Structures are given as structure tokens and as C-alpha cells.
Image (cartoon, rainbow, N blue to C red):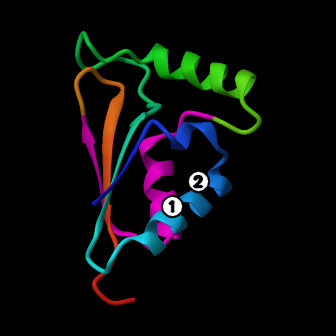
Amino acid sequence: IALAPNIFHHFSFDECVTLAKTYWKALKPGGWLGIVEMLRSHDKIPNHPYDFVEFPVMFNLMMQMTTLTGQAFTEAAMVEILEKAGFRGVQVVSMFPKPYGLVIAQKPESG
């Protein structure tokens, strides 16, 4: 298992694919990667009082203003990043408090 808490938002989409490939190379076949990130949602209406819909948007703006290429990604973007890096079985698990999510993915047993 490799963990990547609060790292990916510092980089661009393409840089994150490269970063994910680095994790992929480090893992043994069948190994897992766990990523904890604040995930942007396309939802405009919260489903729960603790669904802070606006906060990830503000966080995304802050990352764009304070890093060269950073941003807060959507769940779909995180799945795409990991699949492009060669991971399979990507899952996103909502965490409390939202908007954090656990993104887990597995390096295939054979490649």
C-alpha cells in the first residue's frame, strides 16, 4: 500500500499522471494506492448539511493563485488520472467531512 494524502492538488493534470505513474512503478503487482484529496463537485445543491459545496471551489481558486499548476480535481478527473497511469479498479469513497474523498486504485497483478 502506498499513501498520497493531500499531494495531487499541488500539480496539473498531466503532472498528476506522471506522479501516479511513479507510484505505479513503486508498487508490486496487486498493490494499492490510497489518495486523500479535497474533491470538487459539479453539484450546486448540497445533499447533506456538511456538504460544503463552495469550499472546494474556493480551495481550487487558492491553489491556482498560489501554485504554478495546482488545482482541486473532481472525482472523474482523479479516476482519469489514475487510469492513465495504469491503475485499475479506481474507487472514490466519500469521507466526513465532505468534500474530502479517499481515492483507491490497484496496480494490476499482471501488466
State whether residue 89 is above or below residue 99: below
Quadrant in the picture for residue 45: top left
Point 31% across, 80% down: residue: 29
Judged from the image, the secondary structure of the residue bearing numbered disc 2 is helix
Point 65% across, 21% down: residue: 61
Task: Please give the label number shown on residue 111.
Answer: none
- Farthest top residue? 49
Point 72% across, 23% down: residue: 66
Horizontal relation, residue 38 to residue 93: left or right: right
How packed is label 1: few (under 14 Cα within 10 Å), some, or many (20 or more)?
many
Horizontal relation, residue 72 to residue 30: left or right: right
Quarter of the image with the C terminus is bottom left
Judged from the image, the secondary structure of the residue bearing numbered disc 1 is helix
- Farthest front residue? 26
Q: Which residue is mark 2?
A: 16
Residue 67 image point, x, y percent: 72, 30
Q: Which residue is mark 1?
A: 20
Q: Are marks 1 and 2 in contact (CB under 8 Å)?
A: yes
Which amino acid type is marked by label 1? Answer: Ala
In depth, the one of 88 and 76 nearer the eye is 88
Point 62% across, 34% down: residue: 71
Residue 75 belongs to the span the image colors magenta = yes
Which amino acid type is marked by label 2? Answer: Cys
How packed is label 2: few (under 14 Cα within 10 Å), some, or many (20 or more)?
many
In depth, the one of 67 and 53 nearer the eye is 67
Horizontal relation, residue 55 to residue 89: left or right: right
State whether residue 52 is above or below residue 14: above
Residue 77 belongs to the span the image colors magenta = yes
Q: Which residues are magenta?
A: 71-94
**Whole-Å distance between the Cαs marked 1 and 2?**
6 Å
Residue 102 image point, x, y percent: 30, 42
